[in-house]
Image (tube, helix red, strand yellow):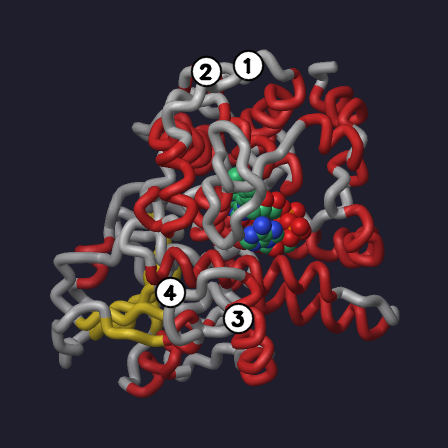
């Protein structure tokens, strides 16, 4: 466990306290959660109960807020059943709760700002990666570099987290700032929040651990066996669609990997392609966001990519669209517009077409800086799996991160390009356009 934990401040553990506080920010779940296990162990060691706290934590539009709220009733039920206290607050209650805590445990998640101003010790726990970020030993520049390290360390970490056993139950107590969330109240609660009401909830994703588990079950039964063949065909719907749940921690990559491996063993399937994405690609993204000073900056690109993009900065673009045109899916390309429409309606884009989506923003923006800002802006606002290490690493991939030089082309230089003709050759673009309702 130690390799997952780091002290985030220099405050002492408070000697007179009512509980240990676990602030669930990125791993909003009651099982397969190393941070929850660590907080429980601290509580048991000190003879204290455990209190778990969740808030909206910056998820400030109807789509993100609804997804978080949909996870709350299940978390409250499951955590209280373990004997922990559970508080959800629509307003920020961290400082007030921390004032009575021996210490605070939270999720060590590279794209969330570390808490400041706490007057008790605060520990960050990496419960997002299967192989702890600290064990990889520095920044890795491509999948081929991190893959052998992960393979070596994986057997030790690909194991269930021991179930939480709390020695002391949290006493019956109501905090005045606490909000009890019932499923039926969610639209009203969202409407009452002072947030951006212009982005509606996703038409296809419902938040929460139970929803994550049933989507995983569906994937195991219907799609794992055809994932390797069809994962790049959007019309086949063969991917897991776990990314929103992984981002909000409603399910852990660890649990997904264990379930996938077990299902593959029982049904004699090969799950390597899926595990490559879930573990190697995802943890490469966490490695990037963990070590990069500014994961949202072109300065983090490899030197060859920065150089070649700079040499082509003055190239004439085949089209130039503004951020607003991109947001509103108003480019000249029906396929690109359909990918953006998927983002606007569902809050994700199919993985293969998402590459096209990103590459075309690079090609059709006035500059690389503007393209990066547009891609991040759209993810921040509309993506259910946005603001994640995967967001930054993959948007930066469109500019050459974790990739190699390719034959030189206008605008991109030696950075890999993608064309609509290529997608038409390899996938059923027409079927995708029909589904998007834009054909
Ligand atoms: C421009 C661009 C932006 C992206 N933004 C995000 C983002 O904001 N959040 C996000 O989670 N992913 C992002 N991705 C990566 C990828 O598109 C999504 O993870 C994937 O499409 C999610 O769908 P799924 O859950 O059905 O994936 P599956 O194919 O079922 O894969 C299972 C899991 O593996 C991981 N995974 C899959 N592909 C990748 C990848 N290329 N890199 C890292 N991990 C991967 C994800 O956690 C995913 O949920 C982006 C890709 C591009 C090209």
Q: Are marks 3 and 1 in contact (CB under 8 Å)?
A: no
Sequence-first tag of 4 and 1: 4
Residue displayed at 50% across by 26% down: 363
Residue 186, percent from left and from top: 48, 35
Left or right: 114 as drawn, with respect to 362: left
- Disc 2 marks which residue? 321
Q: Secondary structure at mark 4?
A: strand
Earlier along the polypeptide chain: callout 4 or callout 3? Answer: 4
Q: Position of residue 144 (x, y in %)?
A: 57, 66
Q: Looking at this view, name the residue that lies furthest to the bottom.
A: 45
Tell me if label 3 and label 2 are in contact, CB under 8 Å. Answer: no
Q: CA distance from mark 3 to mark 1?
A: 40 Å
Q: Is residue 70 visible?
A: no
Residue with the mark numbered 3: 130
User: Separation of disc 2 and disc 4 at Cα?
Assistant: 51 Å
> Disc 2 or 4, which lies upstream in sequence?
4
Task: Please tell me whether residue 286 is drawn above or below residue 11 in the rendered image.
Answer: above
User: CB of residue at label 4: within 8 Å of ligand 1?
Assistant: no
Q: Nearer the viewer, mark 2 or mark 4?
A: 2
In front of the other: 205 or 366: 366
Instruction: From the viewer's side, name the closer residue of 249 and 85.
Output: 249
Q: Which mark identifies residue 85?
A: 4
Q: Percent x, y for residue 40?
A: 39, 77
Camera-side residue of 172 and 119: 119
For the residue labelled by badge 3, is the local secondary structure a helix, a strand or a loop? loop
> Which mark is in front, 4 or 1?
1
Q: Give the spatial CA distance, label 3 vs label 2.
A: 40 Å
Q: Which residue is mark 1?
A: 331
N-term-proximal mark, 2 vs 1: 2
Res. 90 in view: yes
Mark number, residue 102: none
Residue 27 higher or lower than 132, as above or below: above
């Amino acid at each position: 466990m130690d390799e997952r934990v780091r002290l985030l401040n220099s405050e002492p553990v408070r000697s007179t306290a009512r509980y240990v506080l676990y602030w669930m920010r990125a791993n909003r779940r009651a099982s397969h959660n190393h941070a929850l296990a660590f907080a429980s162990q601290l509580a048991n060691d000190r003879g204290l109960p455990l209190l778990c706290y969740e808030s909206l934590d910056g998820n400030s539009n109807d789509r993100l807020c609804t997804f978080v709220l949909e996870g709350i009733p299940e978390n409250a039920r499951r955590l209280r059943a373990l004997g922990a206290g559970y508080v959800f607050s629509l307003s920020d209650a961290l400082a007030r709760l921390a004032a009575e805590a021996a210490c605070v445990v939270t999720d060590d998640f590279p794209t969330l700002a570390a808490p400041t101003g706490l007057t008790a010790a605060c520990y960050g726990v990496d419960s997002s990666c299967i192989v702890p970020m600290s064990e990889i030993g520095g920044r890795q520049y491509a999948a081929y570099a991190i893959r052998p390290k992960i393979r070596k360390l994986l057997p030790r970490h690909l194991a269930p987290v021991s179930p939480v056993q709390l020695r002391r139950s949290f006493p019956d107590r109501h905090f005045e700032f606490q909000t009890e969330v019932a499923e039926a109240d969610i639209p009203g609660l969202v409407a009452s929040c002072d947030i951006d009401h212009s982005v509606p909830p996703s038409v296809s994703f419902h938040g929460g651990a139970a929803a994550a588990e049933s989507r995983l079950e569906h994937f195991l039964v219907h799609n794992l066996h055809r994932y390797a063949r069809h994962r790049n065909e959007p019309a086949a719907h063969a991917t897991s669609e776990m990314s929103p749940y992984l981002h909000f921690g409603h399910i852990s990559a660890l649990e997904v990997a264990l379930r996938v491996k077990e299902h593959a063993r029982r049904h004699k399937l090969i799950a390597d392609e899926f595990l490559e994405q879930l573990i190697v690609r995802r943890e490469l993204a966490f490695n990037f966001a963990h070590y990069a000073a500014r994961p949202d900056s072109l300065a983090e690109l490899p030197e060859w990519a920065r150089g070649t993009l700079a040499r082509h900065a003055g190239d004439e673009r085949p089209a130039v669209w503004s951020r607003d045109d991109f947001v509103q899916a108003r480019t000249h390309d029906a396929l690109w517009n359909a990918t953006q429409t998927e983002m606007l309606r569902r809050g994700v884009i199919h993985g293969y077409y998402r590459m096209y989506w990103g590459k075309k923003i690079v090609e059709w923006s006035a500059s690389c800086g503007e393209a990066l800002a547009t891609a991040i802006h759209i993810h921040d606002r509309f993506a259910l799996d946005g603001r994640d290490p995967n967001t930054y690493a993959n948007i930066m991939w469109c500019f050459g991160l974790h990739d190699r030089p390719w034959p030189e082309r206008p605008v991109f230089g030696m950075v890999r390009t993608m064309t609509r003709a290529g997608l038409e050759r390899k996938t059923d673009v027409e079927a995708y356009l029909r589904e998007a309702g834009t054909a």
